[in-house]
Amino acid sequence: QVQLVQSGAEVKKPGASVKVSCKASGYFFSSYDVHWVRQDPGQRLEWMGWINTGNGDTKYSEKFQGRVTITRDTSARTVYMDMTSLTSEDTGVYYCARIDRYCSSTSCFFFDYWGQGSLVTVSS
Amino acid sequence: DIQMTQSPSSLSASVGDRVTITCRASQSINNYLNWYQQKPGKVPELLIYAASSLRSGVPSRFSGGGSGTDFTLTISSLQPEDFATYYCQHTSSSYLSTFGQGTKLEIK
């Protein structure tokens, strides 16, 4: 069965960096893009960016551009999200999610499987 | 950037009620609109995609409608397991995405 298993909770100080991993299983890794979504303490969902697991191309939300880097290790079937210059406003649960497409347009997709979430707490 | 606004932010209803949640886009998004349900401590789960297509396995009491800028998620007869938070999601070209702020559905 399809699974996305994320790394554990992290506690970081302001100004530090964090790297969250997302290990995929149960499907052909390079056939499905992976996105990252943050859920803040107020429960708001925020889309961060995505990676084409086949060729490594990435795209980021303007809000996170320059501070977030998404990479993948095809042999390890794992996607990574690296965020720098953390502040308390980065506290939240970070999810990876696989997409599926329902038509040929790059607008036609939804998140069909999610990782369990990784809590990142930024506090001095 | 396109903004997605859900209303109401929270809603109290009873088992058996018919409930409608609205999601409004700041400009036309055709039908590139998905709906998710999230229960406490769980990950979001897809209910509806392309504004009105029911995901396989989702109960038929859930339905989606709308196009352009105004969209709805309707639950025809609320069940106890439907009390959760609902999010709309706009998907755009190059696989970009924006979520609404969520609607929390509580038991009256």
Image (cartoon, coloured by chain):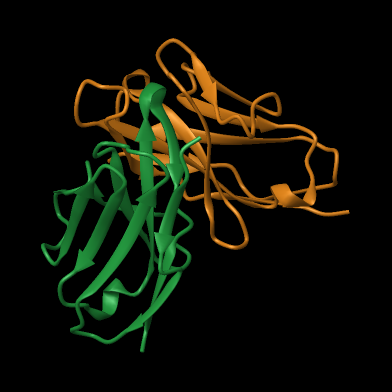
Chain colours: A orange, B green
Rendered image quadrant of residue A29? top left
> Could one spot residue B54 in this view of the protein?
no
> Could one spot residue B36 in this view of the protein?
yes
Rendered image quadrant of residue A62? top right
Q: Locate residue A13 relative to residue B69 in the image: left or right.
A: right
The residue sitting at the right extreme is A124
The residue sitting at the top extreme is A55
Q: Locate residue A1 relative to residue A96 in the image: left or right.
A: left
Q: Locate residue B72 relative to residue A35 in the image: left or right.
A: left
The residue that appears at 45% across and 24% down in the rendered structure is: A77
Picture layout, residue B15 above or below residue B10? below
Tell me where residue A57 appears, x and y as whole percent: 49, 14
Q: Nearer the viewer, residue B105 or A11?
A: B105
The residue that appears at 28% across and 72% down in the rendered structure is: B82
Tell me where residue B16 appears, x and y as whole percent: 18, 84
Tell me where residue B96 appears, x and y as whole percent: 43, 30
Quarter of the picture holding the C terminus of chain B: bottom left
Q: Nearer the viewer, residue A57 or A80?
A: A57
Picture layout, residue A50 above or below residue A97? above
Picture layout, residue A14 above or below residue A76? below
Q: Nearer the viewer, residue A62 or A103?
A: A62
Tell me where residue A9 appears, x and y as whole percent: 65, 51
The residue that appears at 69% across and 24% down in the rendered structure is: A66
